[in-house]
Amino acid sequence: MSLPVAVLAGGLATRLRPLTGPIPKALVEVAGRPFVEHQLEWLRGQGVERVVLCVAYRGEMIRDALGDGARWGLSIEYVFDGDRLRGTGGAIMRALPALGPTFMVLYADSYVSCDLAALERAYRASGCSGMMTVFRNDDRWDRSNVLFAEGRVLRYDKVERTQEMHHIDYGIGVLSARAFEGFLNPGSPTAGNSTDDAFDLAAVYQRLLAAGDLAAFEVFDRFYEIGSPDGLEETRRFFDKKEKA
């Protein structure tokens, strides 16, 4: 697969405290190994060759643990938020020079299962600047935040959710660098003087949606996540069962 993958691994993981006091969320143990290693193995199995880890909180620990990625047959680069957190959108924008014109984005606390080659083909066929993967969640494993109908995202909101929303942002998507035009570059000389250069990836998706520039790719296998204590335990059970199979 030709596209690099940005892995968003810079959060403070406050919901997992005290577990994540001394370590970043990406290094939380799942089935005897740091969770991020499971992600890297899956990405390599999907044909990914290059990963850019967007890190912040205890990011040096992630870099020390994973190195250059050669163990997984990957090339891993690291982009640090710098003096303060930039948000998921700001972290990606800071990493754009390493990512290039088109890339995939994966949340560091999600384990997903979909055909990345098919996702890339669908993205290229869409002609859009972004593609969101969606899954019919019906509030089962997390709060649904997407109104999806007839193959299109009609509404996406992580804060103002409605009863019409049955789908959820699955945790991996495709974006072009042009999707970030108009957002303040966290690496620019004017950045750092306000909070304007810290923004969420959701703001990028919402802007693309409003412009009719966001495509959708529906997946049908559930996701696992380690962002919450319950999610972590469920993910551990999934991998324990998988390792014993």
Image (cartoon, grey):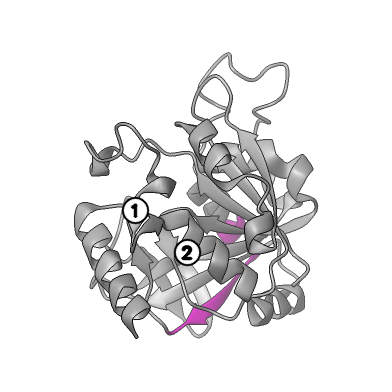
Provide the residue designation for mark 1. Answer: 29
Q: Quadrant of the C terminus?
A: bottom left
Q: Residue at x 49, y 50 (%)?
A: 202
Indicate which disc residue 107 carries: none
Given residues 91 and 199, the one toward you in this image is 91
Residue type beneath disc 1: Glu
Q: Which residues are magenta?
A: 208-220
Q: Residue at x 42, y 61 (%)?
A: 110
Classify 29 as above or below 148.
above
Provide the residue designation for mark 2. Answer: 38
Given residues 95 and 245, the one toward you in this image is 245
Label 1 SS: strand
**Residue 5 seen:** yes
Given residues 187 and 149, the one toward you in this image is 187
Q: Position of residue 214 (x, y in %)?
A: 61, 65
Q: Residues within 10 Å of mark 1 (few under 14, many from 20)?
A: some
Q: Quadrant of residue 117?
A: bottom right
